[in-house]
Image: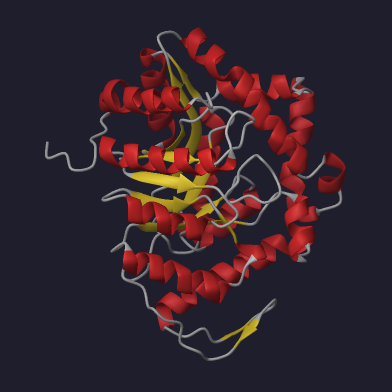
Amino acid sequence: MDMGVMLTTAHPDHWTETEVFDNSIDFAVAADELGYQSAWLLEHHFTRYGLCPNTLTMAGYVLGKTKQIKVGTAVVILPLDHPIRIAEQTNMLDQLSHGRFILGVGRGYFPKDFEAFGVDPAKSHVLQTEYVDVIRSIWETGSAKWDGQEITLPDVTPFPTQYTRPNPPMYGVGQSPSTIEWAASRGLPLIMPVIGTHEAMRSILDLYNETAESHGIDPTTVEHAMCTVAHVANTTQEARDEIWKHMCWWEQEHDDAAFTMEQLQKLPNYRFQYGEWQAAALRGDRTNADFTNYMLDHSIVGSVEECVDRIGRTMEVTGVRNFQLGVEATLNRGRILENMNMFAEEVLPRVGWKPNGATS
């Protein structure tokens, strides 16, 4: 079982940019000392939703400040970068940390990113697919030689090579059927947002498993991860009240930066996301507050008993035992650290979790 924390680098008005990063590092160090197994970094551009434009750079700093925790990217936006550079940087972090780095990849969802970096969002899916294949080929062969649909590369040998053999761990973020089938065809574990019912998440994993098996991959060997808002308080109502306003702010920052419904309608490769907009409208979740409430209804938010029950039920229905916990929802430094402590001491041990370094 792997329990990790998400370092969002969200930038509310009451923190300076320096405080955002200082807090993130302190949260990572605290997670390391509390025995969490992983810490995850988010890449964003041109938005206060998150100030980290390069998760690989920040991962190097976090790895240097910690002792045993693994550090992952959730994600590197692959279409905005170059696969050789990502392979080189991943290998270097893998070497420097003696195997504590995890590469998580995604294709992006914010239109300004594609516009500013000169990438066609209509190709995000094919770019991600090919770039992942290039990186995996480098790990397998040691050469970057590639002649593909979107990119041609010379026969050069990237250095350093990877520390972890046969390759560092890699995850893909996704919910759409096409992304799930793509990841499953390569045995790539998923990072899945916990939004929706347990049964809906189980359906995603059923599709993954069926596709993986059709490609000769044993799905029982693939360990997926769930990412979710996680906040515990004395009562469930208190937990929701503490974070509701801040979650509304964060969700609004996301909505302001993300593709609009009109933009999604013109992008066939984001058809699933457009469908999610339609589903929200049919549910009556037309406002930011409506969606925030819906999200909290399906997150690990509540009393100790409620959080234990929600984690246990998620594991029971989905079989997933790895979680990325969004512990920063209060946007209050002291309360975030307290939240991390409460999960480590009062919630997680009751679902079978043991901290890093535990011997029994």
Q: Residue furthest bottom?
A: 155
- Residue visible at 49% across and 14% down? 239
Q: Please indicate whether residue 115 sits to the left or right of residue 181 in the image.
A: right
Residue 185 percent across, percent down from the top left: 52, 61
Q: How many marks?
A: 0
Residue at point 33%, 37% (across, down): 30
Q: Residue furthest left?
A: 360
State the quadrant of the N terminus: top left
Q: What colouring does the structure picture have?
A: secondary structure
Q: Is residue 175 visible?
A: yes
Q: Nearer the viewer, residue 104 or 61?
A: 61
Quadrant of the image containing the C terminus: top left
Quick check: can you spot residue 323? no
Residue drawn at x 56%, y 12% as measured from the top left:
241
The residue at 46%/78% (across/down) is 138
Residue 310 occupies quadrant: top left
Q: Position of residue 221 (x, y in %)?
A: 35, 54
Q: Residue 167 in the image: state x and y as whole percent.
A: 37, 69
Give x and y (percent) for residue 357: 18, 43
Q: Quadrant of residue 274?
A: top right
In the image, residue 84 above or below residue 39: below
Position of 347 relative to 112 (above/below): above
Left or right? Give the position of 116 relative to 222. Answer: right
Residue 19 appears left or right of 354: right
In the image, taking residue 314 as reference, residue 240 lies left or right, namely right
